[in-house]
Structures are given as structure tokens and as C-alpha cells.
Amino acid sequence: MASQEILREEPSRGSFINDPRIRSLFFQTLVVILLFSSIWWIVHNVIENLQRLHIASGFGFLKSRAGFDISDTPIAYTSDSTYFRALVVGLLNTIIIAVAGIVLATVVGFLIGIGRLSQNWLIRKICTIYVEVFRNIPPLLVIFFWYSGVLAVLPPPRESIHLPLGSFLNQRGFYLPRAVWGDGSWLIGVALLLAIAMAWFVAHRARQRQRATGQQFPVFWTSVALIIGLPMLAFLLGGMPLTFDFPKQSTFNLTGGFWIKPEFLSLLLALSFYTAAFIAEIVRAGIRGVSKGQTEAAAALGLRSAPILRLVVIPQAMRIVIPPLTSQYLNLTKNSSLAIAIGYPDLTATAGTVLNQTGQAVEGVFIMMIAYLVLSLVTSFVMNIVNARMALVER
Amino acid sequence: MQEHDMSWVRTEMALAQPAPPTERGAYAWVRKNLIGSVGDTILTVLGIAIVLWVLPQIINWAFINAVWTGPDRTVCTTASQGGIQPDGWTGACWAFVNAKFGQFMFGTYPIEERWRPILVAVLFVALLVPMLIPRVPRKGLNALLLFVALPIVAFFLLVGGVFGLPHVETPRWGGLLVTLSLSFVGIAVSLPMGIVLALGRRSKMPIIKWLCVVFIETVRGIPLITVLFFASVMLPLFLPEGVSFDKYLRALIGVSLFAAAYMAEVVRGGLQAIPKGQYEGADSLGLGYWQKMGLIVLPQALKLVIPGIVNTFIGMLKDTSLVLIISMFDLLGVVKQNFADPNWATPQTPKSGLIFAAFVFWLLCFGMSRYSMYTERRLDTGYKR
């Protein structure tokens, strides 16, 4: 304490040019002046350019009629709807493709990543080839490959490929049977919710009992029985209120059923297979990052190989895996903007159309940026919660 | 009682016995790696089934049934589609790639001027190869030539308009030329810019720090397409009337800014990994900020993050394919553009063209990642566990 005060009292600096505080103040002022003058210059130019092009600035255009059609509309939309609604449709499509892609990429990525650590030489090699191929090819190219290379050269609707369970594949997309829920199907939903609540309760009680008495309870199988059994029971009691709407072949097209368009399909396959290669590497690094001593110590405690994996290795591996996994999810969400290249109407594509129609470049790009930033922040937020639950609890 | 020493002690070690037959040779390897357990055996059978199902199809399509040369689409279509192949034929149409090879490499660069990009490529390789081989001396001069002299020479050679070379405007550039030139300039710009941004983010001056944070996080939060939109739609608005610059340059700015933000985070990771003692040691030697960073901290930090830097380069090379969305024609763009050529429109054309492009991208990216692994091993000073 004393020595610090003494030092403070003796400013032994030679010249004020060498004083770090003055220097820092000087540089920062310089930066601020430069920044503000360039911003002023840019704003000045933008205003002048907009006036010359007769474009009114502001977000008023959002309320006017869009006048263009969108092929995939999760919510009601016609060309008479507003620009705002068009952008919302685009945002919803982005969210749909991102969520579907994240789920598929995670499943494939974990399988491949675990496969790369397999004892089995053949499986290991197959997984390595997968990772090395997909990591080093641009995702846009993979999208085109599925879209123009594979799906576009499928047979026309009249010669559709029949797949099991009454589904069809042709150059217009993938047709699945659609479930039609009849009266009384709400019971099934209620039963499912109830089953989940009960399973959670059982797991909670089992954990308490194990802590108190050391006795274990087969939580996993009980939950499976509950979650499958209760809705099944409700289904039978409710008089089986479920029918399927099968796609039917007519002369030129298929009618009915659930139609997945080739744009969505190629985007989903390309994005998730591309991201899966990166997730596989993350998973592999995570599992290898758990030291061998952990496995051996668990074995010394008498655990079998399944509980070792479940209770010792995976929780520690997840700690290494989750942060980079989050950034892969963010990458997938951002890469979904490649949809514009094959005409899937995601946020970038619709915002691009709006931007071209109205000439509101500044506002359009601004909306895009804000939307993606918010999506990124939400994804990070959710993953941070997961991460906090997984994090090492230290004293 | 005199006892005879009956015990006998060996003076040399007994030779090690060979491992039992079950533990050596091909059979042991198979047993360990392919049929270790019931589950393993099932997986192996499944794996073999997949390989036997997929591999012959690929080999048939890509080599045995493939068409290598031909004048137009008839060689790659079946009789019912108006071609010469028997019905039911499927095979790669390498004839398409063959016929369009010049375009795939140079776009619509004038044919009589194509010696210029070829010369640039030769110079590039001639400078890059000695740069990559550690034993070749004079790295400093080499780097100067590669990163300063070559871009200047390449600029005048490719753009022309001086020394009697005809001017070739950038919309005529295309194919691998655009892919490689965009990535090279992007790499050359984004690394120093990323370093500056990373240093700024760790700076003690609050305003500079927050400017860098805002820039990095905003750019990292949005897709490259948005950045490219920004560069192609908004940049012209930012400039006074009459001043406009080339679309190619705009894409270049977009790609470089984008890569710089990612590079900054990679470099920051390296900076954070350097122990505080190194900074303090540099301070106590009386080094100034730039000397401290340039001589002590950055050499160590950059060495730590070589894999990350190369990954960013690879990402950037792959990302240059997105410029086709703002209607520029890089390798992928040119390939896709040629699907529409009625002379070559066959069901096999898109697949063949895309696989060719994928192969080129794959070679470049895979080569980079292998080289980075090699460098990492070479520079490893043994401090890692």
C-alpha cells in the first residue's frame, strides 16, 4: 500500500508524450474524430444518393402491399399481404430449416463422431472418409448437388418412385402420408403430457431414493413404458381417431399427403450433412479429451461399461463439446441463407426480393442483420443454459 | 559341510517368446479390428455391405460408363433422349467438363489473353512452393515477393490496360481465376486485419476496444450473404455520386471484412493463451507496445493458432463460392451457369460438373489442412503434453 502511494507521488516520466494516459487519450480522440467524420460523410452521401434516386427512407414501406408470391408459407400469406408479413414468412422459414437442420446434423454428427472412435477398423475408415470429404467442399456446392444433380433428375410424377409406407419420390419432391387427427385426439396429447410429467416425477423420486438408500430404480425403461404406453392407451380408448391421407397419383401430379419440396429437401440434406462433418470432429475431440484415468477409475469402482459411458465419460465430454457445438449451430443457421441460391424463400431471399422491389437497400440490409443477430443471440442463450447445467460444479 | 553349488544362474536373459499365434498376423488384426464382439461383427458386415453396394456404383458411374470426350450432348444422352448411348445408361459426362475446361478455369477471359492468368499462376506456384518448404532459405525475401510484389504484378497482368496489354474488365473474369484471386487477396488482407482487430479487442483503451468488439461480433453474427449484399447494395450508396467501384472489388471487400472478423477471434484465442509473464518480461526489457507484440507475443500466439488460421483460410476459400449470389462467376458459378447451355443439357451434366468442381475445392482445402498439420508438428517446441 505504502509503496504504491509513494510511486504515485513521484511521476518519474520524462515527457508528457510518453505518458500512456495522455497517449491513450490522444489516440482515442483521434479514432473518435475519424469515425464520426467518416460516418458523417457516409450518411451525407446516403441521403444525397437516396434523394437523387427518389427513395423515401424509413420503414413505412413495410405496411404496403408486397405483390409477390412465396412458395412455402407456414402462415397465411398471399401476394396482397404486406411486406412485413412477407418478411415474417421468410423468418419462419429460416427458423424451420435451422431447427430441422440442427436436429438432423446433431444426430448424424454424433453417430459419425462416435464411429470415428469405434474399435471397428472399417467403420472408423468410413466415418473418416465422410468427414474429410464433406468438410472440404463448399456447402453451396453440396446444395446444388442435391438440387440439380440428384433431385432434379428423378423421374417425373407419372413414374414416381414408390417407397415404403405409401410415400413417393419424384422430381417435384418427396410425398409422405399425412396424419389426420380425428375427434378425441386431444386425449392423446394430454396423455403424452401426463406421461412426460410422470416420467419426470419418477426420475426425481428415484434419484432421491438412490441418495437415501442406495437402491436403484430402472428409470429409463419406466419412462419409455410411460411415454409410449399412456398415449397408446388413450389412442385405443379414444376409438383410434387417426387416419392417414395418402398421396395419390393422378395423371400429372400427386395429390394429397404431406409434400416436401425439393428446395427444402436439398437445403436440409446439404446443410445437415455439411455441419455433421464438423460436429463429428467436435464429438470425437470431446470424447478423446476425457482422460483415460477417468474410465479406469470408474472401472475400479466397479461400474460396467455402459454406466461408465453414461455417468463418467459423456458428462465430461459434453463440457468440451457444447461450446464449439453452439458455434456450429450458429453456422448452420447462418448458412441457411444459402437457400436464396435455389429459391427456398428464407429470410435472406424474401428480404432480397423486398429490397429489389422497393429499393430500400439500407432498411432491407438492416432488417436482415438484426434478424440474424437476434437468431444468433437466442441460439447462444439456449446453449448457454444447457452449458451451465453441464458445467463443472466446483467448490 | 561343504555343499556343492547345485544352483545354476543364467547369465543372459532368456529370449522373449513370440506372441501367441492368436495375437499376431493378419488373423489377430482382423479379430481385434473387425470381429471383436458380436456387435462389432454386425457393424463390419453392415459396413462391407454398404461399401459393396456403393463403391461399384460409383466406379461404374465415374470411370467405366463415363464419357470422356465428345462434341456435344449426344454422347452423354441415351437413345430415347436423342443421344447415342443405349437406354438405361448412366455415367459421368466428363466430356462436358472437358469441353468447358477453359471456361471453368478463366470464365469468359478472352482466349488470346489467357496466357496472362496462366503466367500469374506459374509465378504464384513458383513463389509459393519455396515458401512452403521449410528448408529453402530467404523466407523474408520470398514472403515479400509473394505478398507484395506478386499482387502488384498480377494486378497489372490480369487487368491490363498498360504496357500494351489490352484491358480485360473484371466482369469477364471467372472460374477458378476468380475463386483463387478472391481467396488469395482475402487471405493476404484478413490476416493482418484480424491481428489488428484482435489486438484492438484486447487493448486497454475503452473506445478502441468497444469498436473492435462491436465490429467483430456484428460480422460474426450475420451470414456472409448479408455481408455480400451489404457490399454490393449499400457500398455504392455510401459513396458520393459518380464514384463507383467494380463489383469484383466490392465482393473482395465483403469477403475480406468477413474473414477478418473470424481471424480476429482466432488470433485472440492465441493472445489469451500466452502467459502473463511473457508480457511482463517484454515490459521489463523496456520494449514498447509494438516491439512487445511483434517480437515476443505474436510469434508465440500465432504459432499456437496455426490450425485455427488455416481453418479460417479454408472456410474463406469455400465461402468465395457464395459470390455467385451477387451474380459473379467463380468456379461454382461458371459450372452452374453452363448447365443451361442447350448444347450440353443432359441429366448427367449437373452431377458431373458439380463433382468436378467439388474435386477441385476438395483438393485445395484438403491440401491446406494437411499442410497445416505438418506445420503444427514442425513448429511444436515440445511444450505440449
Image (cartoon, grey):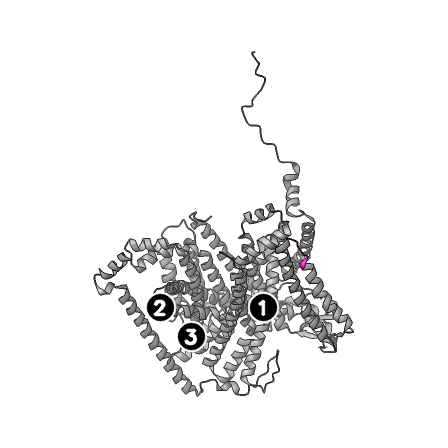
Residue drawn where x is 57% and y is 20% of the image:
B8
What secondary structure predominates along the stretch shown in magenta?
loop
Camera-side residue: A192 or A151? A192
- The amino acid beneath tag 2 is Pro
Residue A6: numbered disc: none
Which image quadrant is residue A286 in? Answer: bottom right
Tell me if mark 1 has few (under 14), some (14-19) or many (20+) residues whose alpha carbon lies within 10 angstroms of its own: many
- Name the subunit of mark 1: A
Q: Position of residue A214 (x, y in %)?
A: 64, 53
> In this view of the protein, can residue B327 be seen by the observer?
no
What residue is pinned by disc 3? B246
Q: CA distance from mark 3 to mark 1?
A: 28 Å
Between label 3 and label 1, give the one nearer the viewer: 1
> In this view of the protein, can residue B309 be seen by the observer?
yes
| Residue A218 magenta-highlighted | yes
- Label located before the other in sequence (3 or 2): 2
Q: How many marks?
A: 3
| In the image, farthest residue toward the left | A14
Name the secondary structure under disc 3: loop
Q: Say if A8 sits above or below B138 in the image.
A: below
Q: CA distance from mark 1 to mark 2?
A: 43 Å
Camera-side residue: B381 or A170? B381
- Name the subunit of mark 3: B
Q: Say if B19 sits above or below B242 in the image.
A: above
Tell me if mark 2 has few (under 14), some (14-19) or many (20+) residues whose alpha carbon lies within 10 angstroms of its own: some
| Residue B2 magenta-highlighted | no
What residue is pinned by disc 1? A143
What residue is pinned by disc 2? B206
- Name the subunit of mark 2: B
Q: Which residues are magenta?
A: A215-219
